[in-house]
Image (tube, rainbow, N blue to C red):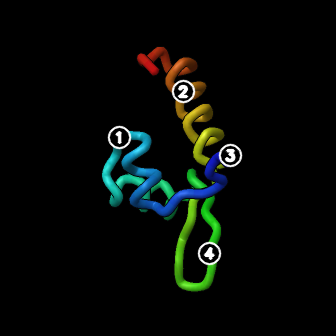
Amino acid sequence: MDRIAYSVVEAAELVGLSRSSLYEQIAAGQLRVVKVGRRTVVPADELRAWLTRLAETADRDGEAA
């Protein structure tokens, strides 16, 4: 079965960013998360959508994705 959510640390490792970089994206409202009790998880679909939005923004701005 495929994972449907990741911890912030796991999501950061998957995309090659630091944990604090992901928390900055969360605080800015760019990456949506779900709270499960005290734990914060990133739904896999949201992680993919966030990366797609970043790539589209980079393409519009003429940057390498």
- Residue 60 in percent (x, y) is at 57, 19
Q: Which of marks 2 and 4 is in front?
A: 4
Q: Nearer the viewer, mark 2 or mark 3?
A: 3
Identity of the amino acid at label 3?
A: Asp
The relative height of residue 60 versus residue 52 in the rendered view (above or below) is: above
Quadrant position of residue 19: bottom left
Q: Earlier in the sequence, mark 2 or mark 4?
A: 4
Picture disc at residue 16:
1
Q: Which of 54 and 46 is in front in this view?
A: 46
Are there few (<14), some (14-19), or many (20+) residues within 10 Å of tag 3?
A: few
**Local SS, label 3:** helix
Picture disc at residue 55:
2
Q: How far apart are marks 2 and 3 (CA)?
A: 15 Å
Q: Name the residue under label 3.
A: 45
**Local SS, label 1:** loop
Q: Distance between the residues labelled 2 and 4?
A: 26 Å
Q: Which of marks 1 and 4 is nearer the N terminus?
A: 1
Q: Mark 4 points at which residue?
A: 35
**Local SS, label 2:** helix
Of all residues, the one furthest to the front in this rendering is 1
Q: Nearer the viewer, residue 34 or 1?
A: 1
Q: Distance between the residues labelled 1 and 2?
A: 15 Å
Q: Distance between the residues labelled 3 and 1?
A: 17 Å
Identity of the amino acid at label 4?
A: Lys
Quadrant position of residue 6: bottom right
Q: Which of marks 4 and 3 is nearer the N terminus?
A: 4
Q: Distance between the residues labelled 1 and 4?
A: 23 Å
